[in-house]
Image (cartoon, rainbow, N blue to C red):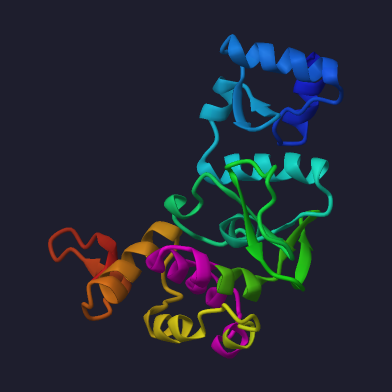
């Protein structure tokens, strides 16, 4: 067991069994509290898990699932994580999203959510198949809470994707192009992380306040010390 533990740590992924015997051993270790189950058949040591932020935890899951399901194309908030988009932790949730030409299967676990897409455009990012950046953003608009999906749009625009590229990616019948158009005026490329982007979306899109200035430097007239505000 030490071998599969060490290999998982080296590859920065969850521990997974290679045969029925290891599966039984991992199940017993989990029942004894020595391991935490993150997904059916996938485990991590509690002490190691506690050191990871939600993005890192999700990526450990993704790498392990890719070994088990080479045909999966990750989508939605999972794809946003793989693309390293700056979104708030709350947007990640507990589910794994994949693009799928079919409806949910009867043997899908509760953590797996299929996003219907019969001909998903996808790329390899760090060795993992994932929906294209623009497709990921559109899926975010379709499936995520509004302010969370705006943070995905912010991050895409900051990476150089244009608004017309995002609109052109709305190619499926259920794509909410009207909602995307409504969200674009509230995007910003000035936010430096997902938390700032989410707060900006709440201030402007949800609450209807004027767009604040961001990253404004203020000089203390007494000490001449410079402070920089997230919003001004």
Q: In the picture provided, is 195 more to the left or to the right than 168?
A: left
Foreground pick, 89 / 110:
110
**Residue at coordinates 63% horizontally, 88% vertically from top-left?**
168
> What quarter of the picture does the N terminus occupy?
top right
**Percent coordinates x, y for residue 102 in the rendering:** 72, 62
Reply above or below: 54 against 40.
Answer: below
Question: Is 179 on the left-hand or right-hand side of 58?
Answer: left
Residue nearest the observer in this picture, 174 or 227: 174
Q: Nearer the viewer, residue 62 or 187?
A: 62
Q: Looking at the image, is 208 positioned above or below residue 15?
A: below
Residue 218 at x, y = what percent? 23, 68
- Which quarter of the figure is the C terminus placed in? bottom left
- Identify the residue at the far left of this view: 222
Along the line of sight, the residue nearer the viewer: 85 or 135? 135
Q: Relative to 27, is 176 on the left or the right?
A: left
Residue 128 in which image quadrant: bottom right
Name the magenta segment's main secondary structure.
Answer: helix
Magenta-highlighted residues:
140-166
* Image x and y of residue 90, in percent: 43, 51
Q: Let me know if residue 34 appears in the view.
A: no
- Residue 155 magenta-highlighted: yes
Q: Is residue 153 left or right of residue 1?
A: left
Q: Is residue 10 visible?
A: yes
Vertical position of residue 35 compared to residue 212: above or below: above
Q: Could you tell me residue 178's position as x and y percent?
A: 46, 86
Residue 159 among magenta residues? yes
Numbered marks: total: 0
Which residue is painted at 37% across and 63% down in the image? Answer: 198
């Amino acid at each position: 067991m030490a071998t599969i533990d060490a290999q998982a740590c080296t590859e920065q992924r969850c521990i997974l069994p290679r045969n029925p015997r290891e599966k039984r051993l991992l199940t017993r270790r989990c029942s004894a509290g020595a391991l935490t189950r993150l997904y059916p058949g996938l485990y991590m040591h509690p002490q190691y898990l506690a050191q990871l932020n939600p993005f890192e935890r999700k990526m450990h899951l993704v790498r392990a699932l890719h070994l088990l399901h080479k045909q999966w194309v990750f989508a939605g908030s999972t794809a946003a994580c793989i693309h390293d988009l700056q979104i708030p932790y709350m947007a990640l949730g507990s589910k794994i999203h994949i693009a799928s030409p079919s409806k949910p299967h009867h043997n899908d676990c509760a953590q797996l959510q299929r996003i219907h897409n019969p001909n998903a455009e996808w790329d390899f990012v760090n060795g993992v198949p994932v929906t294209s950046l623009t497709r990921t953003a559109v899926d975010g608009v379709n499936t995520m809470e509004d302010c969370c999906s705006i943070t995905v749009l912010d991050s895409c625009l900051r990476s150089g994707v244009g608004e017309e590229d995002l609109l052109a990616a709305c190619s499926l019948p259920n794509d909410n192009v009207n909602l995307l158009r409504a969200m674009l005026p509230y995007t910003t490329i000035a936010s430096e992380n997902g938390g700032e982007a989410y707060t900006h979306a709440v201030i402007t899109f949800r609450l209807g306040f004027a767009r604040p200035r961001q990253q404004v430097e203020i000089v203390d007239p007494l000490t001449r010390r410079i402070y920089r505000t997230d919003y001004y």
